[in-house]
Image (tube, helix red, strand yellow):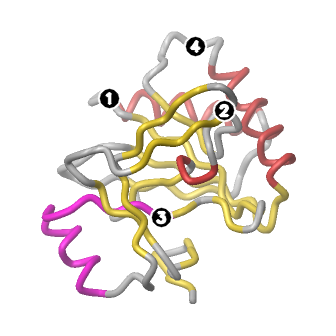
Amino acid sequence: MKIQIDDLEFNSDYFYIQSNTIVEKIIFNNRTFYSKYEKVNTPINKEIIEQYKRDELTLALPLIEDDIVNYLVIEYYQEDWQSFYSLIKHLFKTLNITDYVTYKSPNREPLQIFIKSKNTPLDIAYERVDKIKQTLELKPTKSYRIFPNKNSPKNYNIIKFPLNIL
């Protein structure tokens, strides 16, 4: 089952809800990850989305499905998101990235930039992410995350539910 959010489409067979406590311990590449996101194995519904909009819960969606990615995602977590967004637009022109959608909710973080990458195998998505990361590392700002992240387990490659298109 799919869910449509403006121009974005995600699998809605399951989703994640953030908990106040650690719900899962994951060992990956000799590192230990502690997740506060609990996987809910039911399709996402309008009631859950409304609770998220009212700030009653934090909702996240999987980015990787069967080693395929449809979006590369940059999340930025600072108040100066406008300057970061200007930087990203310039960077995208340099890298010839034209098909992307930006989301920013008025009352919450993060700024989210979804680069459309339909049915991209995970290894190719990692290469594209690395190229963007290398270019961003030349800039002083480090308050962003780029997904998919090859240094994290697949169920750590989840993104907050996007709300308002910019």
Report if residue 48 lies within the magenta region: yes
Secondary structure type for disc 4: loop
Between residue 112 and residue 95, name the one nearer to us: 112
SS of the residue at dot 1?
loop
Residue at 56% across, 53% down: 155
**Quadrant where the image shows the N terminus:** bottom right
**Residue bounds of the magenta highlight:** 46-61
Question: What is the CA distance from the residue labelled 3 to the residue labelled 4?
Answer: 29 Å
Point out the tag, 3 or 4, that comes first from the N-terminus. Answer: 3
- Say which of 105 and 56 sits in front: 56
Residue 146 screen position, x and y as percent: 58, 38
Left or right, 106 with respect to 6, comes to: left
Give the label, 2 or 3, closer to the camera: 2
Q: Name the residue carrying label 3.
A: 61
Instruction: Give the mark nearest the N terminus, 1 or 3.
Output: 3
Identify which amino acid the numbered label 4 is placed on: Lys
Measuring from the top left, give residue 54's x and y in whole percent.
13, 68
| Disc 1: which residue | 78
How far apart are labels 2 and 3 at the CA level? 19 Å
